[in-house]
């Protein structure tokens, strides 16, 4: 009994230390975003919101933020279109599943710089309907999907494995075609896992820097790329503001997912 209690205290202590390890850098960044200094320093000498004004009135920063959002949404969409059928097939297949699953998650182990250069060399000179792919948001989203897709599959395969296999059989017995049964029967039941997988894909793209550095132009720069370029030229608190906005976007996406999950559970009750 005493050992169990001691283990419980130790577990909580490690959890608290981990939370502090994550939150302290974010807290420092948030404080520096409200700095009145002209350069990044901590501790700050005074509080001011003027750097937020500079950020939201700077067309280049706002354009980078919108680019990041558009690419992240496109990446999440592309990842889910590919991950849903692949994950369902893996969850219901047995023979070649280990090999196929390994191949699908392999891009996670390839360095981002290698993927970025490979995509640029393979598709950079390609035109689609008269539209040059290099420097386009679509090309960046394709590259981000190489990392986001394995994460989505990792979430979706266990989700589909836990579903009752008789659901599709029952829908088929009632005359529903397989595709219609999947969308009308399987997807509503697996929606929590689907939303989680889409969220992983969205956040992966939103934060990705290395591939975007190789594949974007001045017009399609993402927020992480803009952060890096600005840090090289001038270390002002505006960089902390951009970091704060990026982190807030991630927390907002996660928060909205939790709200949706809570409302959906309440609706089922």
Image (cartoon, helix red, strand yellow):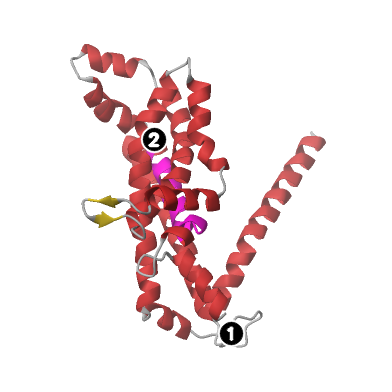
**Above or below — where is 125 with respect to 3?**
below
Q: Residue at x 38, y 54 (%)?
A: 124
Frontmost residue, 113 versus 173? 113
Query: Is 159 in the magenta?
Result: no
Q: Residue at x 20, y 19 (%)?
A: 176
Instruction: Check the picture and name the quadrant holding the N terminus.
Output: top right
Q: Magenta residues?
A: 194-212
> Which residue was labeled with disc 2?
83
Q: Are marks 2 and 1 in contact (CB under 8 Å)?
A: no
Q: Residue at x 54, y 42 (%)?
A: 108
- Residue 18: mark in rendering: none
All told, the count of numbered labels is 2
> Which residue was labeled with disc 1?
39
Q: Position of residue 230 (x, y in %)?
A: 51, 75
Query: Is 203 in the magenta?
Result: yes
- Mark 2 falls on what kind of element? helix
State how far apart marks 2 and 1 are (Cα): 44 Å
Q: Answer few, some or many: residues within 10 Å of disc 1's Cα (few below 14, many 20 plus, some between 14 and 19).
A: some
Between disc 2 and disc 1, whose residue precedes?
Answer: 1
Q: Residue furthest left?
A: 175
Task: Classify residue 260 as left or right of residue 26.
Answer: left
**Above or below — where is 110 with respect to 54?**
above
Q: Position of residue 234 (x, y in %)?
A: 55, 81
Frontmost residue, 135 versus 251? 135
Task: Classify residue 97 as left or right of residue 72.
Answer: right
Q: Residue at x 26, y 30 (%)?
A: 183
Judge whether residue 188 can be spotted in this image. yes
Instruction: Check the picture and name the quadrant holding the C terminus.
Output: top left
Frontmost residue, 104 versus 32? 104
């Amino acid at each position: 009994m005493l050992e169990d209690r001691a283990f419980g205290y130790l577990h909580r202590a490690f959890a608290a230390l981990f939370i502090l390890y994550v939150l302290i850098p974010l807290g420092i960044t948030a404080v520096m975003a409200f700095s009145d200094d002209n350069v990044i320093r901590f501790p700050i000498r005074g509080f001011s919101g003027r750097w937020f004004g500079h950020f939201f009135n700077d067309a280049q920063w706002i354009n980078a933020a919108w680019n990041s959002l558009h690419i992240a949404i496109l990446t999440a969409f592309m990842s889910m279109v590919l991950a849903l059928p692949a994950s369902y097939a893996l969850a219901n297949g047995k023979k070649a599943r280990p090999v196929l699953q390994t191949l699908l998650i392999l891009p996670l182990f390839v360095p981002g710089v290698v993927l970025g250069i490979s995509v640029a060399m393979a598709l950079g000179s390609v035109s689609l309907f008269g539209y040059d792919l290099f420097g386009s948001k679509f090309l960046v989203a394709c590259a981000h999907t190489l990392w986001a897709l394995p994460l989505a599959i990792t979430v979706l395969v266990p989700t589909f494995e836990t579903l009752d296999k008789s659901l599709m059989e029952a829908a088929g017995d009632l005359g529903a075609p397989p595709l219609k049964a999947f969308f009308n029967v399987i997807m509503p039941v697996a929606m929590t896992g689907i939303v989680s997988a889409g969220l992983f894909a969205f956040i992966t793209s939103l934060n990705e820097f290395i591939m975007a550095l190789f594949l974007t132009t001045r017009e399609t720069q993402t927020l992480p790329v803009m952060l890096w370029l600005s840090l090289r030229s001038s270390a002002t608190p505006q960089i902390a503001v951009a970091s704060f906005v990026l982190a807030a976007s991630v927390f907002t996406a996660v928060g909205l997912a939790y709200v949706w999950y809570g409302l959906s559970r309440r609706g089922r009750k």
